[in-house]
Amino acid sequence: MSQHFNDFTQIERHLDSLGLFHMDMGLHRMRCALSALGLARPPFVTVQILGTNGKGSTAAFLSSLCAAHGLRTGLYTSPHFVSPTERIRVDGQPWPQELWAPQASKVMNAAPDLTYFEFLTVLGLLAFAQEQVDVAILEAGLGGSHDATTAVSADVLCFAPIAMDHKDVLGPTLAAIAADKAGAIRSAAPVCSARQFPQAARALEAAAQAQKAALIWADAANASLELGLLGPHQKNNAGLALACWQQLALMLDKNPYDLQLQRQGLAQAFIPGRMQYVPATDSLPPLLLDGAHNPHGMAALTKALQQAGHQPAAAVFSCLGDKDWQTAAGMLKKQLGAVPIFVPTLHNPRAARAEDIVRFFNATSPATVQAVPEPQNAPAPDPQAAQSTLPPSLAQALAQATAIARSNAKGQPVLITGSLYLLAEFFSLYPACLSPAVSAQGRKAHE
């Protein structure tokens, strides 16, 4: 029986019914869906971005490089902050929700048993085909061997740094995690990689050799280049995107060494929630938003804070319980010292308990960390904002951190970090902060 979506709301309802975090490993469903829809070998050049930290930033740099060279570009990333439309972008803009229903109906009729991530992956490919993109950049969700994006033929693979993450799914050691991610190398398509830990490097080398694929090790981008994303670690992500671009350009009949267009592409890259500065408003102090959620990501954040040469006035931190949050939290606490930290309840079934986070923070240091209760009628920091869209505990955390920042004459920002899902709760109240223009203003103010 044919199934048909009439509007975007019905699609959202279907996605909600699938469960955001439900996983069913294996590529059989994806392969059947792609075969039925003629997408196993898409009608555009395809890049798959894998790794643990820096996937989104690398994808953003690469997408911007493609756009600077006049290519129509599709970008598929995850997670989203406010709307699923953020995951499927064409020429830098979310694919309009009014276009979703016909293509989502095709996905549903071809493969009604797809998971949340699989459904959106196939939908993104259909969208890119409809929009006749020249190149599509697909960010893997989890792992590599069994990730939905691995069911698609790839022309170039790109590996951001691989670190400990998703141990319960991918394996208990870095070698096991790297082997799973390296399992995405499935043909002789060139493989570009950032510099890796030795165990991860060995896994990539073995997989590339088995498939007779060229393995290109990327160096950090030149320090003289202006980058649209802040933090010293972004030089590595930009360098990886440049290495990938040089492979892509040859496939797309573009000059791989046009330095002016490369500079333009790297300078215009944007992705929210990665060392993102937001300028002060009437209701909020300056903010620094970063989704550091594991030790590798937290190391990049703390290094960036040290390089900036100042401390935040206050911080808001929460995290998922299935990450190595204790190590990341310890690194953050060491960096912040006596800076007040507020821990709201993260509204996510995988969230670590706020009380456990506070207990960990305060176990071996002065009690500068507070759990934020969840009162029935907590005031939002901005009285003009739609209060119903922000969980009360985060509202109160922002209010308390704002009060501290306002009393600080140095104009230091409030840091919000620990999980992209915490940032999603913030962006749900302040969606304007998802704008590249707002981020550019914040970057200039920071500089």
Image: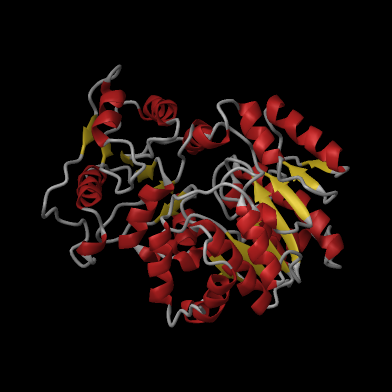
Decide if residue 136 is in sight here: yes
Decide if residue 266 is in sight here: no
Q: Nearer the viewer, residue 46 or 268?
A: 46
Q: How many marks?
A: 0
In this view, the residue farthest toward the front is 1
Residue 295 relative to residue 407: left or right = right
Q: Quadrant of residue 231?
A: top right
Q: Is residue 280 above or below residue 86?
A: above
Q: How is the structure coloured here? A: secondary structure
Q: Nearer the viewer, residue 118 or 422?
A: 118
At horizontal 67% and vertical 28% (from top left) the residue drawn is: 197
The spot of residue 226 in percent (x, y) is: 64, 53
Q: Quadrant of residue 220?
A: top right
The spot of residue 109 in percent (x, y) is: 55, 74
Residue 206 relative to residue 125: left or right = right
At horizontal 69% and vertical 31% (from top left) the residue drawn is: 200
In this view, the residue farthest toward the top is 364
Q: Nearer the viewer, residue 334 or 292?
A: 292
At horizontal 61% and vertical 45% (from top left) the residue drawn is: 234
Q: Is residue 297 above or below residue 285?
A: above
Residue 173 relative to residue 367: left or right = right
At horizontal 36% and vertical 59% (from top left) the residue drawn is: 427
Residue 344 relative to residue 437: left or right = left
The spot of residue 331 in percent (x, y) is: 43, 27
Q: Is residue 141 above or below residue 217?
A: below
The spot of residue 222 in percent (x, y) is: 72, 44
